Every structure is written in C-alpha cells, then in structure tokens.
Image (spheres, grey):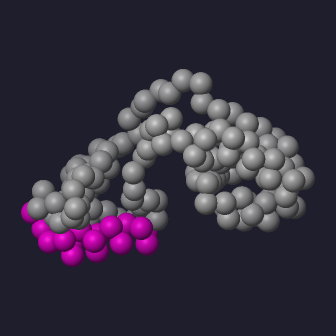
C-alpha cells in the first residue's frame, strides 16, 4: 500500500487521538491545512486499502463498565462458524485468530462483571466450548503508534 503525503501527515498527527469537539474532522482539516472533504476522503482510502482498521475512542474499561480477554479452543473445521457467531455479539471486539491450542481470542465488554459472566455462559452453551476468561489484573500503557513521516 502506498501512502500519500496527506495520509502520512494525518496518521502522524492523529493516530494517538482526535480532537474532542463537535466537528473533529473539520478541526483535523484545519490542523493539516486542507479541507474536511480531503480528510474524509483520505480516511476512506486508508480504510478501503486496509491501512486503517477503525476510528473511534478507546475507553478506560474500568470506568465504562467491565471487560475481559477470552480465548476459545476451537476445532479447525468449525472455526469460521464459531468466529462468525462470536462476532454477532455487540459486546465483542478485537476478535482474532492465534496459532495455539486456544486459537480464537476476543475482548468481551459489558456494563458490569455480572453481564460478562452471563455472556461467557451463553457463549459456552452456544458453542459447546469452555471460554478461558482472562480478566486484566494490571494495565500497562504502551505506545502502539508508529511515526510515518516523510519517506521520500
């Protein structure tokens, strides 16, 4: 994927946070000295090309409810069906495949721990698999951003 100059500037400037205002794309455009339409078109291109996975907030889960990391050991023949079923839950995000006995991992969120526990039981009943419940004990904050910069 080739990244154009506006995309580079947009990623460098906003990968760690968007403006918190009524019109964040307009504020981004002003900071980048371009139009709001150009910012939106750039984001659309990045998403279509696979260079952008999401735009949205990251919540401090302990303030916004409860969450846990869940792993399932899914037999290969049923992996796609189980993943599809798990993805139907609005409380699920970050669902991904790993090369391990526990091969399907996802983050489960909810308003409280009781809700999470009910979902874990429901997932076990629907899939016939026992979820491995891995609630976070300590949060480690790391910078997952990468400077893109001018690579010409």
Asked if residue 25 is positioned above or below residue 56 in the image, the reply reads below
Residue visible at 33% across and 67% down? 43
Based on the picture, tell me whether residue 46 belongs to the magenta stretch. Answer: yes
Residue visible at 72% across and 65% down? 84
Q: Name the foreground residue: 17 vs 42.
A: 17
Task: Note whether residue 103 is visible.
Answer: no
- Our reading of the magenta stretch's main secondary structure is helix
**Rendering coords of residue 105 (x, y %):** 69, 46
Asked if residue 53 is positioned above or below residue 140 in the image, the reply reads below
Point out the image quarter for the N terminus. bottom left
Residue 17 lies left or right of residue 77; in this view the side is left
Asked if residue 124 is positioned above or below residue 2 in the image, the reply reads above
Residue 57 lies left or right of residue 98; in this view the side is left
Toward which corner of the image does residue 83 lie, by quadrant?
A: bottom right
Residue visible at 65% across and 38% down? 113
**Rendering coords of residue 2 (x, y %):** 35, 65
**Rendering coords of residue 152 (x, y %):** 21, 56
What residue span does the magenta drawing correspond to?
33-49
Q: Residue furthest top?
A: 138
Residue 41 lies left or right of residue 113; in this view the side is left
**Rendering coords of residue 58 (x, y %):** 42, 46
Residue 128 lies left or right of residue 92; in this view the side is right
Task: Note whether residue 48 is visible.
Answer: yes
Residue visible at 21% across and 56% down? 21
Q: Name the foreground residue: 114 vs 10.
A: 114
Based on the picture, tell me whether residue 105 belongs to the magenta stretch. Answer: no
Q: Residue furthest right?
A: 128
């Amino acid at each position: 994927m080739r990244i154009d100059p506006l995309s580079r500037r947009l990623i460098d400037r906003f990968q760690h946070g968007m403006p918190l205002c009524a019109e964040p794309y307009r504020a981004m455009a002003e900071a980048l000295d371009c139009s709001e339409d150009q910012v939106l078109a750039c984001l659309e291109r990045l998403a279509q090309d696979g260079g952008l996975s999401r735009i949205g907030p990251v919540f401090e889960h302990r303030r916004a409810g409860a969450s846990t990391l869940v792993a399932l050991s899914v037999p290969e023949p049923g992996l796609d069906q189980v993943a599809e079923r798990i993805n139907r839950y609005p409380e699920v995000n970050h669902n991904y495949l790993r090369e391990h006995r526990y091969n399907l991992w996802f983050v489960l969120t909810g308003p409280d721990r009781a809700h999470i526990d009910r979902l874990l039981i429901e997932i076990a009943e629907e899939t016939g698999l026992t979820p491995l419940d891995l609630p976070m004990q300590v949060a480690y904050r790391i910078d997952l951003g990468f400077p893109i910069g001018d690579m010409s």
